[in-house]
Amino acid sequence: MNEAPLHIVLSFGDWLSLFGHYMLLSLMSIGGAISTTTEMHRYLVVEHHWLTQEQFNNSIAIAQAAPGPNVLFVALMGWNMGLNAGSYTLAFAGVGVTMLGILAPATTLTYMAARWGHQNRELLGVRAFKQGLAPVVVGLMVSVGVILAKAGGNPAADWPLWLVSGLAGLLIWRTRIHLLWLLAAGALVGWFLG
């Protein structure tokens, strides 16, 4: 399913708003930038219509498949926004705005918090905080999976995909099978059933 390309006009205020929004998302990105894709989807696709659903999904898929950090999907979203605005110059601006917005606050905060946490690692509050973050990260990742799965079509018709996803999650949780083996198995199942 190929959607028609967007033709958007972005003012300086739009770029500034995008930068500020990504700075806020950066501070919410516990577990990595991928954990905030639900909010990115709402902001970029649903609210402002700066990206199509297909561009949004492709940005994530390409970045996850490519070697390197998975935060590159943010750069691809910025790139696609700039192309939708009409030029390669704006595409590079989109990459710069989104990447600086998502990386600068989290990097600064992480550095300062890690330094403080290391100095105070024996405090009960520090240990409790670290343990309390695990369920938050899992919840954010589940919400990302639901948004991406719902965008693909009819969840009722895609029950085999939900079943495979659930089984993979269960295997990851309860066994020591390496994640790459599950990815390879998923690729084979997709190849034979697709």
Image (spheres, rainbow, N blue to C red):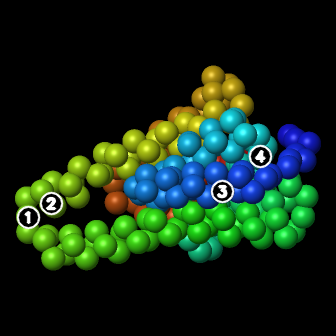
- The residue shown at (63%, 27%) is 155
Q: Is residue 176 left or right of residue 119?
A: right
Q: Is residue 59 visible?
A: no
> In the rendered view of the protein, which quadrant contains the N terminus?
top right
Q: Nearer the viewer, mark 2 or mark 3?
A: 3
Distance (Cα) linking label 2 and label 3: 37 Å
- Disc 2: which residue: 127
Residue 118, position as x, y percentages in the image? 19, 75
Q: CA distance from mark 1 to mark 4?
A: 46 Å
Indicate the quadrant containing the C terminus: top left, top right, bottom left or bottom right.
Answer: top right
Numbered disc 1: secondary structure? loop
- Distance from disc 3 to disc 4, alpha carbons, whole Å, reads 14 Å
Instruction: Say which mark, if any, is on residue 50.
Output: 4
Task: Please tell me which residue is depicted at 43% across the width and 52% down the height of the picture.
Answer: 28
Q: Nearer the viewer, mark 3 or mark 4?
A: 3
Q: Which mark is residue 16?
A: 3
> Of residues 32 and 155, which is closer to you in this image?
32
Tell whether label 4 touches label 1 (CB within 8 Å). Answer: no
Provide residue 50's location: percent of width, then percent of height.
77, 46
Disc 4 to disc 2, how far (Cα)?
41 Å
What residue sits 52% from the left and 49% below the top? 36
- Pair 4/2: label in front: 4
Residue 110 visible within the image: yes
Quick one: label 4 or label 2, which is nearer the N terminus? 4
Amino acid type of the residue tagged 3 in the rendering: Leu
Q: Residues within 10 Å of mark 4 (few under 14, many from 20)?
A: many
Residue at the (72%, 40%) spot, across then down: 48
Q: Earlier in the sequence, mark 3 or mark 1?
A: 3
* Residue wearing tag 1: 123
- Characterize the local packing of mark 1: few (<14), some (14-19) or many (20 or more) Cα atoms within 10 angstroms: few
